[in-house]
Amino acid sequence: VREEERHPSFRRHDPDYIVTNFTTTTYNAAGRAESILSADKMIHYPDDDSTELERPHVVQLKPDEPRMTVRADRGLLSSEGDEIFLYDNVRLVREASADRPEARMTTSFLHIVRNRSLARTDRPVRFEEPSRRLAGRGMEYNYGTGELVLHAEVRGSFDPRGSQ
């Protein structure tokens, strides 16, 4: 171990930059926006390359997929930016498409893998459409295909009048 690595300042968890009203956009090969990540504040720590987000907001705009918007009280961003971990009051909205109504999901934690169109949690989750409600513990949602898998303690209700 080099002498300078033993110095306490190299072990501190101090931010090297803080950005307020942060927004970043990811584009596909054709130059179209695929996702937008914004936050009230972004704090980066160089010692472990972690990034904290205050009040993050994610919008997925992939072609041939319904727009998905996610908000939370706080979040963490992976060092490559392809994974987002959202905490506290997480709210996901999938916009209506030609064959599916708008859907809303709420949970206390959500892990988003942007390049795989995947959202998952191991916590209680509630999923609502105009005539259906599902709840359970643990979930994987592929918002590209619309496939939703609830893992445990699954409960649901269906209003046949709402589907007409």
Image: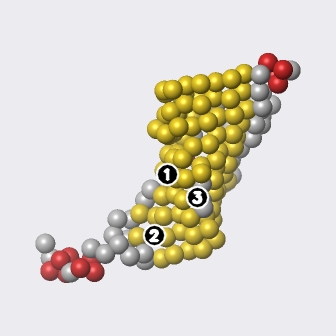
Q: Are marks 3 and 1 in contact (CB under 8 Å)?
A: no
Residue appearing at x 42%, y 75% in the figure: 15
Q: Is residue 79 left or right of residue 47?
A: right
Q: Which residue is mark 1?
A: 85
Vertical side of 142 occupied by 53: above or below: below
Mark number displayed over residue 75? none
In space, the residues marked 2 and 3 are separated at their CA atoms by 17 Å
**Amino acid found under the numbered disc labelled 2:** His
* CA neighbours of label 2 inside 10 A, class few (<14), some (14 to 19), many (20+): many
> Which callout, 3 or 1, points to the residue nearer the camera?
3
Nearer to me, 29 or 136? 136
Distance from Cα at disc 1 to Cα at disc 2: 15 Å
Mark 3 or mark 1: name the one nearer the start of the chain: 3
Q: Earlier in the sequence, mark 2 or mark 3?
A: 2
Instruction: Using residue 139 as the reference point, say whether residue 5 is left or right of it.
Output: left
Which residue is nearer to you in this view: 106 or 40? 106
Image location (x, y in percent) of residue 47:
33, 70
Q: Position of residue 74 (x, y in %)?
A: 54, 59
The amino acid on which the numbered mark 3 sits, given as a three-letter code, is Asp
- The residue pinned by badge 3 equals 73
